Amino acid sequence: MGNFPGGSAYAMVREIAEGYFSVTERTFTRMTRPELDKLRFELDRLLREIRGNQPALEDLAEVQKRNRRILRINTANMVLRSYRMKRKI
């Protein structure tokens, strides 16, 4: 298992998407390369899943919720990419 808050990479990504967990570069300091790879895979997988579920355009609350989740995942992905570039991982 490892250093994933929530128990697994998938659980961590779900918490990020819902806004329960904030990601900074310090979040990744204890993680190994395979764990970072797994986290990246799960971020991409959940992002595809969220983008695949299109709410009705009249349901503004659901559209906003979906967009916030996409934003959080994209931000986490950007922070992860930045961390890996700085550390050359």
Image (tube, grey):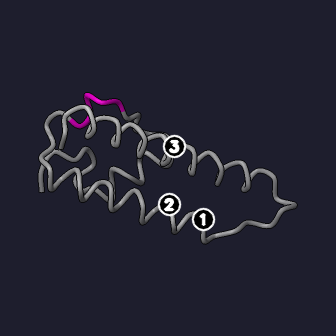
- The reply to whether the magenta stretch includes residue 57 is no
| Image location (x, y in percent) of residue 51 | 60, 65
Query: The disc labelled 1 sits on which kind of residue?
Result: Arg
For the record, the magenta segment spans 24-28
Residue under pointer 3: 72
Of residue 44 and residue 23, the one placed in the foreground of this image is 44
Is residue 52 left or right of 56 when viewed as pictured? left
Does the CB distance between marks 1 and 3 fall below 8 Å?
no
Asked if the residue at tag 2 contacts the one at tag 1, i.e. Cβ–Cβ closer than 8 Å, the answer is yes
Name the residue located 38 percent from the left edge and 52 percent from the top edge. Answer: 13
Is the magenta region chiefly helix, strand or loop? Answer: helix
Q: Would you name the residue on which mark 2 appears?
A: 47
Q: CA distance from mark 1 to mark 3?
A: 13 Å
Q: Position of residue 16 (x, y in %)?
A: 43, 45
The quadrant holding residue 44 is: bottom left
Queried whether the magenta region covers residue 26, the answer comes back as yes
The quarter of the image holding the N terminus is: bottom left
Q: Earlier in the sequence, mark 1 or mark 3?
A: 1
Marks 2/3: CA–CA distance: 10 Å
The mark found on residue 51 in the picture is 1
Q: How many marks?
A: 3
Residue visible at 27% across and 48% down? 6
